[in-house]
Image: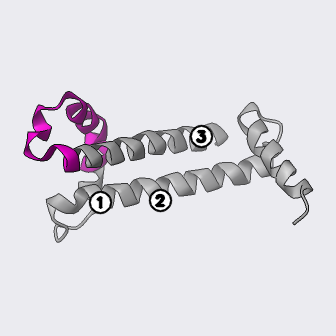
Amino acid sequence: MLLLASILKALAEIAGLSLVGQGILYLLMGARRNQNFVYKLFQGLTLPVMKLTRTFTPKVVLDRHIGFVAVLLVTVVWFVSGSAKLGMCLGEYQGDPLCTQIVEAYQRKADTPP
């Protein structure tokens, strides 16, 4: 379960950064964005997220707003999976190698006076 939360969090980070990068290039390149190799790369990375977002959103949401909704969806997935990972690491998986940095940072923070 911890591995699943870690993988989901990592995928959300990749998708989120790709969406932000694509959005920045969208603003910078304007109409020439479809000729840009990096924009096409980001488009290929974000296509599954955009399609998934389109299936979950009602038809009232316009296609041009799907990018914003996708960023919100990825942010929620990242937050939920990160919270689940944190809860597992501070609970039953404290000795797991995936949790060592989280547990050490939490203990350092708990040891410092306010």
Q: Earlier in the sequence, mark 1 or mark 3?
A: 3
In the image shown, does 35 or 70 lie closer to the viewer? 35
Q: Earlier in the sequence, mark 1 or mark 2?
A: 1
C-alpha gap between disc 1 and disc 2: 13 Å
- Give, as a single range, the part of the protein colored magenta: 26-51
Q: Amino acid at mark 2?
A: Val
Horizontal relation, residue 54 to residue 10: left or right: left
Is the residue marked by circle 1 packed among few (<14), some (14-19), or many (20+) residues within 10 Å?
A: some
Horizontal and vertical percent position of residue 90: 79, 51
**Magenta-drawn stretch contains 71:** no
C-alpha gap between disc 2 and disc 3: 15 Å
Query: What residue sits right under mark 2 in the picture?
Result: 76
**Magenta-drawn stretch contains 42:** yes
| Mark toward the viewer: 1 or 2 | 1
Q: Relative to 82, say whether 68 is above or below.
A: below
Q: Is disc 3 placed on a helix, strand or loop? A: helix
Query: What residue sits right under mark 3 in the picture?
Result: 6
Q: Is disc 2 placed on a helix, strand or loop? A: helix
As drawn, the residue found furthest toward the bottom would be: 60
Residue 68 disc label: 1
